[in-house]
Amino acid sequence: MGWLTQLTGKVVSLDTAPLVYFIGKNPAFHTRLRPFFQALQQGDFTVVISAITITEVLVYPIRHGDAKLALLYRDILLNAEHMRIIPVTGEIAEMASKLRASHKILTPDAIQLATASVMQVDFFLTNNKALPVLPKPTILVLDNLLD
C-alpha cells in the first residue's frame, strides 16, 4: 500500500464514505481500506473527523432499525484511540460557507473540508471526486489510489 506510507506521522481527516465502505464491508473498497484502519489502530497517524460524520453514518442504521450497526459506528467513532471528533465551531461554519459559495459543494462536504482546513490536517481521505482542490489538505480519492 504505497499511498499509506505518506500518511505516517501525519494528521488525516476522514470523509464519511471510507468509514461506511469499511464498516459495511463494501466489496470494492473494504480490502483496500483494511490496511488504513490497521495503521490507524497502530497509531501510525492520527485521524480527525467532523462531528457531522456521526450524523451522516448513523442515518442508514437508524432509518433501517439496525441498532447493532448504529452501535458499531458509535463505538468506532467515539472510542477509537487515534481518532478525534471535532465539533462544528463558528470558525469552521464560516469557512464552510465560503467553500460552499465558491465551489458549490454540499454543506456536509463543506463542513468536513473546513474542519480539515481549520485543524491543519495533511490529508483528506474521501471518494468524492467532485471536491475542490485546496492548497491544504491534500485530497486522496480512493478510486485514484493504487493498492
Image: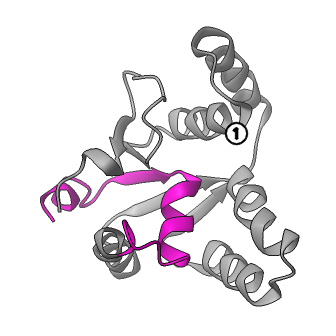
Viewed as shown, does residue 79 lie left or right of 7?
A: right
Q: What sort of colour scheme is used for the picture?
A: one colour
Horizontal side of residue 142 vs 19, given as left or right = left
Residue sitting farthest toward the top: 102
Q: Does residue 65 appear to the left or right of 118 in the view shown? A: right
List x then y, in percent, for residue 138.
33, 35
Q: Residue at x 76, y 29 (%)?
A: 93
Say few, some or many: other residues with alpha carbon within 10 Å of mark 1 (under 14 / 14 to 19 / 20 or more).
some
Q: Is residue 48 visible?
A: no
Task: Specify the quadrant of the image occupied by residue 72.
Answer: bottom right
Q: Nearer the viewer, residue 124 or 33?
A: 33
Q: Residue at x 41, y 52 (%)?
A: 12
Q: Residue furthest left?
A: 2
Q: In the rendered image, which residue does mark 1 sit on?
A: 108
Can you give x and y, in whole percent of width and height, for residue 121 in the image? 43, 43
Question: Which residue is drawn at the image coordinates 72% and 54% (left, top)?
Answer: 51
Residue 75 x %, y %: 67, 83
- Give the extent of the magenta segment: 1-30
Camera-side residue: 144 or 36? 144
